Image (spheres, rainbow, N blue to C red):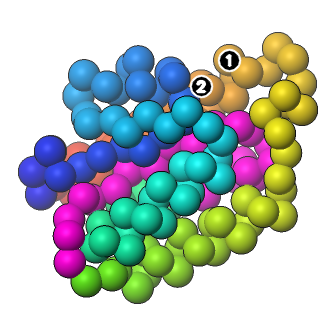
Amino acid sequence: MKKKEVLIVTNNPLVKEKIGDSYNIDFIDGGIQDVMEKLRDMIHKGSKLLTHPLSGSVKPGQTPYKSVMIHVVEGNVDADSLLMIEDAIDNCKKFVKRVDEFREGTDEDKRFIDFTLISSGIESFEALK
């Protein structure tokens, strides 16, 4: 798998800043739901998830940030990826929370947690190559 075929879809500015030189980033100016819908659209075109859209024990209602690694290809729909993203979207709807409802002063922590989770996914991906 070539690096150009790997994309990180994120709404986390820290991920964009720290990983953007090493990986292609699709930065979403929106919430977790927007990230999930972008991933779903890509999966419908044949792309496959490389990291779980609900990685870690952080629920969608506990953070405004999400980063997911995806293999960008065109072709048949990957059933496993589609089921995972649809389940993630359903979970997001259960935990709907506006970004401004998160406690002030925790934004930096939430960005760092998401960054740590995607960094771990990247390490696992690199080890499998």
Question: What predominant SS class does the magenta segment belong to?
Answer: loop
The C terminus: image quadrant: bottom left
Q: Amino acid at mark 1?
A: Glu
Is 68 within the magenta? yes
Is 10 situated above or below 89?
above
Q: Among all residues in the image, which is located at the extreme top? A: 105
* Amino acid at pointer 2: Phe
Quarter in which the N terminus is drawn: bottom left
Q: Is residue 58 above or below residue 37?
A: above
In the rendered structure, does residue 89 fall within the stretch colored magenta?
Answer: no
Is label 2 in a helix, a strand or a loop?
Answer: helix
Q: Which quarter of the picture shows residue 48?
A: bottom left
Quarter of the rendering containing residue 128: bottom left
Looking at the picture, tell me which residue is in the foreground, 71 or 129.
71
Highlighted range, magenta: 53-75
- Write down the residue under mark 2: 112
Residue assigned mark 1: 108
Please report the residue visible at 82 percent of the width from the left and 14 percent of the height from the top.
Answer: 105
Quick one: label 1, few (<14), some, or many (20+) residues within 10 Å?
few
Residue 33: give x, y in percent of width and height.
65, 53
* Disc 1 element: helix
- At label 2, counting other C-alpha atoms closer than 10 Å, the crowd grade (few under 14, some 14-19, many 20 or more) is some
Decide if residue 38 is on the left or right side of residue 111: left
- Which is nearer the eye, 46 or 6? 46
CB under 8 Å between discs 2 and 1: yes
Q: Is residue 29 visible?
A: yes
Q: Is residue 124 visible?
A: no
Q: Is 22 positioned to the left or the right of 60 in the image? A: left
Quarter where residue 95 is shown:
bottom right
Q: What number of labels is visible?
A: 2
